[in-house]
Amino acid sequence: MGKELRLMKGNEAFAEAVIRDGADGYFGYPITPQSEVMEYLMVEKPYEKTGMVVLQAESEVAAINMLYGGAGCGKKVLTSSSSPGMSLMHEGISYLAGSELPCIIMDAMRGGPGLGTIQPGQADYFQVTKGGGHGDYRLIVLAPASVQEMYDFVEISFDLAFKYRNPVIVLTDGAIGQMMEKVYIGEQKVRLTEEEIKEKYPWATLGKTPDRERNIITSLDLDPYRHERHNIKLQKKYKEIEKNEVRYEELNCDDADYIIVAYGTSARISQKAMDIAREKGIKVGIFRPISLWPFPKKALRQLSERVKGILAVEMSAGQMVEDIRMHSVETTPVEHYGRMGGVIPTPNEIVDIIENTFVKS
Amino acid sequence: MSDTIIKEQIFKPENIVYKKTDLMTDNVLSYCPGCGHGTAHRILMEVIDEMGLQSKTIGIAPVGCSVLAYEFMNVDMQQAAHGRAPALATAIKRLLPDKTVFSYQGDGDLAAIGTAETIHACNRGENFTVIFVNNGIYGMTGGQMAPTTLEGMKSSTSPYGRDSQTMGHPLKMTELVAQLPGTYYVTRQAVHTPAAVRKAKKAIRKAIELQQQKVGMTFVEVVSNCNSGWKMTPVDSNKWMVENMFPFYPLGDIKVDGKLVKEV
Amino acid sequence: MAKVKGDIIVDIEKCKGCEVCIDACPTHTIAMSEQVNGKGYHFMQNVHDACTGCTNCAIVCPDGVITVYRIKV
């Protein structure tokens, strides 16, 4: 953790982290509630400080394909958007996954479907954890629950993206993007030189030199058997990620009778609900998945064996709850509480649900 | 001097006056016999070769017949989603301003699904080169109507001829982008005769040279044939192209040194 | 006046028989063969001695199958 302390919005902390981590390029398109990311970058002029490129694209479709071009050259590139923009990007994300290109896509979720609302939502869970675009692929999905995590997850995400040559989604929402909290800022990292990129990422298209064959970045292979082998290789990589990159947080789970499973904004609200419930003598704990994919299924399963009930709290009609049910023991009841359309649940609503669904029955 | 002696004398490396550039791979081109794509590929690679730019060049292949361009061009390449080549090229050129970057796109890719990317890359004055091969049809998917299909022209989705009342008018993308302040050199060429190929190559050379000066978008349209889609022999399709495509898509420079040289 | 003499070598297996080169030859020295290559295409060939090594056929060949030689005689 860095030493410099600032009061920042989540979106701004994310943008500052991008500069500090030595990113090469940001390509984005304005959409509420994450426009501060590009605004912040334009004000900070990282192109003068680190040489980072910041470009406002003509659409989310163009922005995600700019990421493809940049990532194909081994550059650290990213974009940020919100739900409707994410829908537009998923074609490009499928190509990025198919071509195994590293990048970060931040999604500040808002209520849907359609244009929906600009208020916070968590209904993009299916879209980002189950695919979103066409084909068999997976995205690493990290869900920050604080402004500090909005900052910290940039470095983690870039590291994961390049380690596995895979897009990483930072899945947040309007509430965390807009809220202000104190945040520790890290040191400024130096961007990689072209020589360093060549050394680290020999697959990057930086110009064919006599010492190697030409590099080709493509997701196309018309030979079905070869293409199947490519798919098998991808699936192997995803298994590896599932083995190594599970992240979660447990709060008061040791003595808990009931567990709330929630991420992002819902996890923050659930913390307050947990406090209220504990004051009432109900032993509630929180299980917060940080990596939504890979989903922390093993840890959840173990936990589900020793509690009396699990409540999924999401700002959706119930998306993550499907994964929770899949990975909990059958004998433990799993319920869902969600608000939709941009409405944020209150702690008391959550406590009521726990009391009425689990404690009284 | 007998013929055999001459043959022995003539087939020596020092007497070669023309051979395929090494920047074209030895893979057999996936194009139909007589298709202009092969020639357009080759002259582009000849220019990169002659300018000594192989180690600095990054090309973008589109979706369409030339989706496999990376199999034939011996430079680093990326394959873009349909229509998005200018977005890829934009980022690459911005991140690596000293590289030579080109997108190679067909008319369905550039003038239909990728219209926004094309126009905005041109309008921003991105410093890369677009090679736009216009054969008035969707070749790879089996000869459907393209935005560039001529009025009255038959295709598999305009089997009675393109009716502009219901199917829209053929789109002159090259004239359109020439009007944008971000384009510096805009030209329309063809590759059906040796003279046309020589001119087209000069135009591509000029575009790539200008790219080194970072003066803005350089845009070379190559009007080409699609004998399979047009259902003609290669030779007949070239004749048909001269008689029908060229009147609507006239050859020649449209914008030179940032100034329109033709009414558009 | 120095005379030039040209000749060509055709990568027969890569020729697709499109005939675009035939019209491009100013001395009508090339023609399609009666035979076919491995893919069943009639391939182009030099049929008589009038080649000047002008390179027209090679320049217009979409498949880049022609190598042109030229000497002064």
Image: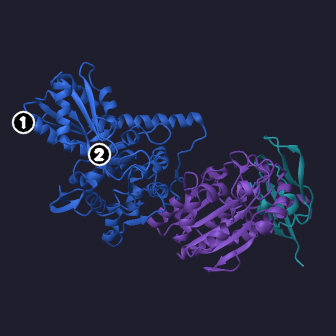
The spot of residue A225 in percent (x, y) is 57, 33
- List the residue tagged with mark 1: A279
Chain depicted in cyan: C
Quadrant of res B167: bottom right
Residue A18, compared with residue A252, is above or below; it is: below
Color of chain B here? purple
Q: Which residue is drawn at 28% across and 32% down?
A: A336
Q: Residue at x 51, y 60 (%)?
A: B87
Mark 1, chain letter?
A
| Secondary-structure class at tag 1 | helix
Label 1 is placed on what type of residue? Glu
* Cα–Cα gap, marks 2 and 1: 26 Å
Instruction: Kindly indicate whether the residues beneath marks 2 and 1 are on one polypeptide chain.
Output: yes
Q: Which of A172 and C1 is in front in this view?
A: A172
On the image, the x and y values in percent for residue B24 come to 65, 56
- Chain letter matching colour blue: A
Q: In which quarter of the image is residue B146?
A: bottom right
Q: Which residue lies furthest to the top in this view?
A: A331
Quadrant housing the C terminus of chain A: top left
Say which amino acid is labelled 2: Val
